[in-house]
Image (spheres, helix red, strand yellow):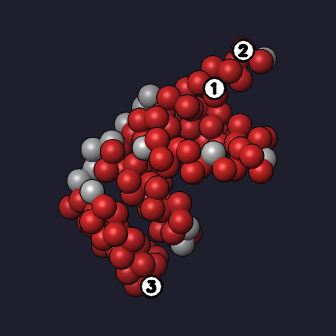
Amino acid sequence: MENNNNKRYAAGAEVMEELFSEEVRAGMQGIKHISPDLWDMIVSFGFGDLYARKTLSLSQREIITLTSLITQGAFDQLRVHLQAALNVGLSKEEIIELIIHCTGYVGFPKAVQAMGIAGEIFKEN
């Protein structure tokens, strides 16, 4: 069982390297110091079991993630996933269109906030 957990963790860490900058990954590791168990779940399950699957591309997974985060109003996580979306090939125009499309489902307040955050991320790049 331990060997399987190591494989899951390694797969998750590999995906995280593709999605997130070293700076973002370092910031995320603050969770590790607070709760090593939660950190292991994030890496092994969140990225090892979910993101490392082969049927959908990382850019398709980021479209789903961005939509879900906007729907939840999880704007802190939205920031890092907007950067990840750019890192795996989504264009600025595709992200803008995704946010516009979400407006009909999540309402203007969440869409406007998401667009403002996207604008900040675009300026940083």
Q: Secondary structure at mark 3?
A: helix
> Given the image, on which type of amino acid does mark 3 rest?
Pro
Location of residue 27 in the rendering, given as x and y in whole percent from the top left corner: 57, 51
Location of residue 36 in the rendering, given as x and y in whole percent from the top left corner: 77, 41
Circle 1: is it few (<14), some (14-19), or many (20+) Cα within 10 Å? Answer: many
- Residues 121 and 4: in front is 121
Distance (Cα) linking label 2 and label 3: 46 Å
Quarter of the view holding residue 42: top right
Q: Secondary structure at mark 2?
A: helix
Residue sitting farthest toward the bottom: 109
> Given the image, on which type of amino acid does mark 2 rest?
Asn
- Residues 37 and 33: in front is 33
What label does residue 109 carry, if any? 3
Quarter of the view holding residue 49: top right
- Residues 34 and 103: in front is 34
Give the residue at mark 1.
8
Give the residue at mark 2.
3
Residue at 56% from the left image edge and 45% from the top image edge: 26
Location of residue 6 in the rendering, given as x and y in whole percent from the top left corner: 68, 21
Distance (Cα) linking label 2 and label 1: 9 Å
Classify residue 115 as left or right of residue 97. right
Of the numbered discs 3 and 1, the one sitting upstream in the chain is: 1
> Given the image, on which type of amino acid does mark 1 rest?
Arg
Distance (Cα) linking label 3 and label 1: 38 Å
Residue at 39% from the left image edge and 57% from the top image edge: 82
Residue at 78% from the left image edge and 17% from the top image edge: 1
Labelled pair 3, 1 in contact (Cβ < 8 Å): no
Residue at 56% from the left image edge and 38% from the top image edge: 47
